[in-house]
Amino acid sequence: MAAFLNPFPGVVPDRKLTATELTRGIRLALAAEEEAVHLYEALADATENESARLVFKDIADEERVHAGEFQRLLNILLTDEESLLNEGADEVDQLLASHGAGQSAAAAGGVPTVGDLKE
């Protein structure tokens, strides 16, 4: 489980959640899905058993679908969520464009990362 504070560990609250508590709970669920993706992808990468690898990758993809569902719900519930996410995406696009899109950080003159080892 993600390391976020859980507003009601193992217990259903004795009242309905406020809008803020609901969105925090959805973020917690989103984080749990992302953590599950990480786990299943790591297991897929760590095995030579093709059957297990295929199952882990399939389950990881299912968790990514769940993450998309939670993110969509946040976009609906929070009027600024999508615009803030788009702002972040635009910042990445601008950064990559200014450093030669498609190039690794090392090739673009930046600090090399582990991902650069794949090239």
Image: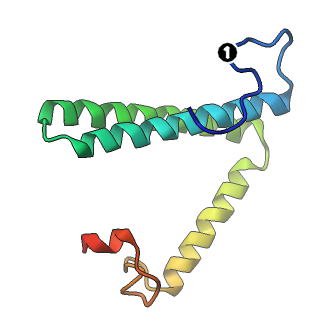
Of residue 10 and residue 107, the one placed in the foreground of this image is 10
- Eyeballing the image, is 72 above or below 92? above
- Pick out the residue farthest to the bottom: 109
Give percent across and percent down for residue 25.
71, 29
Total numbered labels: 1
Q: Residue at x 43, y 79 (%)?
A: 101
Locate the N terminus and report the quarter of the image it occupies.
Answer: top right
35 horizontally vs 9: left or right: left
Give percent across and percent down for residue 71.
61, 40
- Eyeballing the image, is 55 above or below 10? below
Task: Name the colouring of the figure.
Answer: rainbow
62 horizontally vs 67: left or right: left
Of residue 109 and residue 65, the one placed in the foreground of this image is 109
Q: Residue at x 25, y 30 (%)?
A: 55
Q: Residue at x 50, y 31 (%)?
A: 66
Locate the C terminus and report the quarter of the image it occupies.
Answer: bottom left
56 horizontally vs 93: left or right: left
* Residue 5 location, quadrant: top right
Disc 1: which residue: 10
Q: Amino acid at mark 1?
A: Gly
Circle 1 residues within 10 Å: few <14, some 14–19, many ≥20: few
Say which element carries label 1: loop
Of residue 13 and residue 20, the one placed in the foreground of this image is 13
Q: Residue at x 20, y 31 (%)?
A: 52
